[in-house]
Amino acid sequence: MKKVFAVILALAMVISLAACGGGNTAPANQNNTNGSNTNNTTPEKPVYNVGMVCIGDENAAYDRNFYMAADAAKAQLAKEGIDINWIYTYHHPEGKEVADDCEELAGEKNCIAVFLNSYGQEPAMLQIAADYPKTVFAGLTNEGSYKDKLDNTINAFPSIYEGRYLAGVAAGCKLNEMIADGTITADKAVIGYVGAYTFAEVVSGYTAFFLGARSVCPTATMIVKFIGSWGDPTMEAATAKDLIDNGAVLISQHSDSTTPATTAQENKVFHVGYNISMSDVAADASIISSRIDWTNFFVKVIRAQVKGEKQDQDYIGHGLKDGDVVLTELNTKIAAKDTVEAIKKAEDAIKAGTLQVFDTSKFTVDGKVVDHAFAVDTDGDFAPDKDEAVFDGAFHESYFQSAPYFALRIDGITLLNEAY
């Protein structure tokens, strides 16, 4: 009886081991070179694991924008014969949790690349990256990785200010229509902007949006209120309502949820969004959105990893002309009739280099034109001290590095709080 039991047990172990070996997996960890194919069988086509550390989840418009690009990159790479498997972590904005995520993704999960999708995650990422030299770590919307001493850390921030400008053009067209039909007078063309923080990234974005709006509606003004968070649906809604109560007839945002759009609709004002189209939740309010399309960057980094090619440490100078900055579909139900033509005119000029978003002849600071000396005295969050961004009649944003550094407070924009 004991011998029969032993045979049964041995057979069970064989079946169990065979079951554990099934399924598609990533190739052996490049940070750990153990293992080789010692038999003569043809190896299975590799599936490469790729990680993403997310500040939120699919409920946030910001994160959904990344998931769309990740799916598109996976499909594009598959056409090239490169199969990938995305592995996500959620709700980790900074600190030890981000470091643990990076370690797990690069180590246990065997990821050839780890993308971190929000500002604030980079310091924790840099604590781990040196331990996994053959995994590339990409700090998205960050600004330090390209100038550290590690070869496997990189930065990326496509030139979203170009898209913000175009979205502002759409807003300006709507304001003009409201003035023309008597809904508002010219002096009431007030834009309300829900801002996350007083970082250069946010200042650059709302200023570009305002300049786009004012390029077609010269009487437009803007009021901005900061929430001290990248995303807080309740606070975003309350802030949008406060801006409306302060006279805003159109709302825009640099925040992660769709509640500014729904609040605009509830209060019968218009809205321009960010990251994803918000017309599905606010069909009577939300006109258009600007967004970064991360597909090209994901494909570039993953392809280089698979092929063993050197990575560019700062993804600089990529915007409208490369398809890395785009607009969502125009909500023609509510958009002004001349919006398509106005956007196309501005977009063509930006791509051709004949329109500079931060043309210094188009704005002032405290009534003064921004010249070389003025810009040197301005504290930008990220601008290197040695670099002077004002030349050839414009402030050249994201020229010296991909991360935004425009932090001027221009006339025509009023900040309702300075708390963050």
Image (cartoon, rainbow, N blue to C red):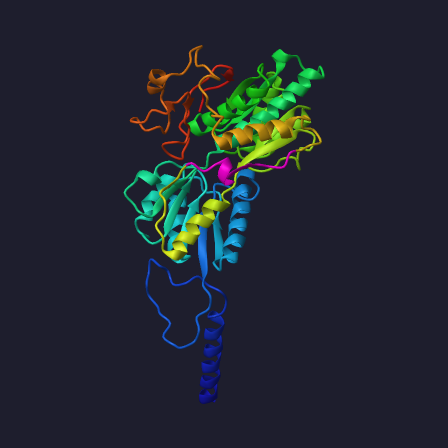
Residue 209 position in % (x across, y down): 53, 25
The image quarter containing residue 250 is: top right
Q: Residue furthest top?
A: 367
Residue 334 position in % (x across, y down): 69, 28
Most foreground residue, 307 or 90: 307
Quarter of the image with the C terminus is top left
**Magenta residue check for 323:** yes
Give me the residue at 55% from left, 18% from top.
222
Marks counted in the figure total 0
Please give the range of residues in magenta.
317-330
**Any part of residue 186 in sight:** yes
Give me the residue at 47% from left, 16% from top.
363
Residue 99 position in % (x across, y down): 37, 46
Most foreground residue, 87 or 14: 87
Q: Residue furthest left?
A: 149
| Vertical order, 310 against 246 (above or below) | below
Q: From the viewer's perspective, is 344 left or right of 52?
A: right
**Magenta residue check for 377:** no
The image quarter containing residue 318 is: top left
Give me the residue at 35% from left, 28% from top.
383
The image quarter containing residue 419 is: top left
| Vertical order, 82 against 393 (above or below) | below
Most foreground residue, 106 or 330: 330
Give me the residue at 37% from left, 22% from top.
391
**Any part of residue 95 in sight:** no
Residue 122 position in % (x across, y down): 38, 40
